Amino acid sequence: MEDKQSNNEDILTNRQGHPVTDNQNVRTVGNRGPTTLENYDFLEKISHFDRERIPERVVHARGAGAHGYFQSYGTFGDDPISKYTRAKVFTDKDKQTPVFIRFSTVVHGGHSPETLRDPRGFAVKFYTEDGNWDLVGNNLKVFFIRDPLKFPDLVHAFKPDPVTNLQDGERIFDFISQTPEAMQMITFLFSPWGIPANYRNMQGSGVHAYRWVNEEGKAVLVKYHFEPKQGIKNLTQQEADEIQGKNFNHATQDLYEAIEQGDYPEWELFVQIMSDDDHPELDFDPLDPTKLWYKDEFPWVPVGKLILNKNPENYFAEVEQVAFGTGVLVDGLDFSDDKLLQGRTFSYSDTQRYRVGTNYLKLPINAPKKHVATNQRGGQMEFEVDKGEKQNPHVNYEPSIIGGLKEAKQSGKDHTPYVEGEVKREKIDRENNFGQAGETYRRFSDWERNELILNLVNTLKPCRKEIQDQMVEYFTKCDEDYGRRVKEGLSSEEHSPMETHRGPIGSTETEQAVQNAKKM
Ligand code: HEM
């Protein structure tokens, strides 16, 4: 006879399916204790609780996520997009591809305030019919460094001091004053662009040059940018301080509530294109992630739209365990030779095997929404073996004449770039560390420049003189006015490190930010 109680969906059980009859009292000798060790329900409950956390992401620990879809336009300007890429996520007009997105801040831990001056992560997983494609980008369109060997040092300088556990502007600028390639990123970061108002009102960028490959195996260089339909909105330091005093979760809350209310955020995806060569006519290297490709020379061409329309059902299962990587590309989308991109590509799956576990790609949030058939077996938390309908369960190797999985057919010609050169450790030729940073400074509007100077002066003021001098030298190389204003701010008694200042607030400011975005 069926046990009615154990099949009742309301009944609390332990993980073994045993009904729990007392969830208030541990088993004890008498009602005052001592407790007994064979108390399986209690041990199971507490030991699972003891393991509830997995390691935080080493960077981008604080985040919010949502589901949605990407809809392609199928064209690139007047051409069918297939002229440049054979990736089906783009070529099939009006095709809707499911996506999961995770926005994040970078430096601090999982519950840190969302008002901090920090780049914002903008990572998108496209569950395409050819398998998953991840575009792991940021809100800002450039990065601090161009060599992946420097990444752990960059992050250590921005993270809290290993002795005091305090974030320290002197450690940050000690590193930055020896890293001139960071000047454009620093110029954006210390301006209002360093504190987006929330996740819905910010851009997203792939930052790196990638490649698109067409049916004939021909490649072009591309950069990806998401533009929010909601408009761009950035905060002054004072506005951010005010929000933080009342709500340190404002960006997560804004995203969650908008989606719950059916006010679905939307971005248009734009792509810039360059021929796949080293472009000696430019004063920078097209593969350098510290540089913008200016819009007037390399227009932003709309290729599709991204809409977020569903909140996660469980934060941990989806937002915490989602795993993005720059190596996760599909047919028709390829790497470029950008060294930083290639360094990142090792780092993501490496950290995820540690952070989530060997079988992290089997979790529903990470698994492709299509048939998967590998010969991988085992590993911690293996719970299901890939099986094709015709697959012989004894054959978990390839090639085989008695069964097993077969190689897929190539869908177009391989792109086979020719590479030669001496193997060496060397900087790139066209560093041009200051030119674009100066141009960015000049393209800002007045209130953005004022904020930039104020934020830099406030952070640099407590630093030692050698660091200040080196930074002023860099700012001057970017733009004389830029250097002069920081220098004056540092020698003036007016600014104290704690002092803040209110810039113009409201719609004019937002309008200006949007106009400026159009220029970059
Ligand atoms: C997260 C490494 C540069 C955007 C991460 C994580 C690592 C990492 C280890 C944690 C991943 C996880 O635990 O799942 C690196 C290295 C870089 C680099 C080694 C340079 C060599 C960049 C750049 C961008 C970027 C240039 C933007 C274009 C992100 C984003 C996340 C992230 C958005 C969070 C992904 C998520 O929401 O799960 N990075 N990163 N990173 N990184 Fe990077």
Image (spheres, helix red, strand yellow):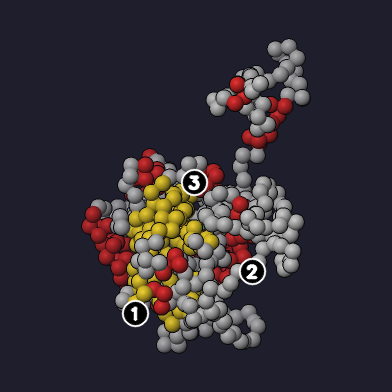
Disc 2 is placed on an element classified as loop
Residue 462 in sight in this render: no
Local crowd size for mark 3, using a 10 Å CA cut-off: few (<14), some (14–19), many (≥20): some
Image mark for residue 407: 2
Relative to 85, is 234 on the left or the right?
left
**Residue found 50% across the figure and 43% down from its top:** 315
**Residue found 38% across the figure and 64% down from its top:** 72
Relative to 500, is 385 on the left or the right?
right
Distance from Cα at disc 1 to Cα at disc 2: 43 Å
Q: Give the label, 3 or 1, closer to the camera.
A: 1
Specify the quadrant that holds the C terminus: bottom left
Q: Which three-letter amino acid code belongs to the residue tagged 1?
A: Glu
Residue 131 in sight in this render: yes
Q: Earlier in the sequence, mark 3 or mark 2?
A: 3
Circle 3 is placed at which residue position?
A: 112
Instruction: Report which quarter residue 5 is drawn in.
Output: top right
Specify the quadrant that holds the N terminus: top right
**Residue found 60% across the figure and 26% down from its top:** 7
Q: Earlier in the sequence, mark 1 or mark 2?
A: 1
How far across and how far down the image is residue 13, in percent?
62, 27
Q: Residue furthest left?
A: 508
Local crowd size for mark 2, using a 10 Å CA cut-off: few (<14), some (14–19), many (≥20): few
Image marks 3 and 1: residues in contact by CB distance under 8 Å:
no
Q: Which three-letter amino acid code belongs to the residue tagged 3?
A: Ser
How far across and how far down the image is residue 276, in percent?
47, 82
Circle 1 is placed at which residue position?
A: 297
- Label 3 C-beta lies within 8 Å of the nearest ligand 1 atom: no
Q: Which three-letter amino acid code belongs to the residue tagged 2?
A: Glu
Image marks 3 and 2: residues in contact by CB distance under 8 Å:
no
Q: Give the label, 3 or 2, closer to the camera.
A: 2
Disc 3 is placed on an element classified as loop
Ligand 1: which quarter? bottom right
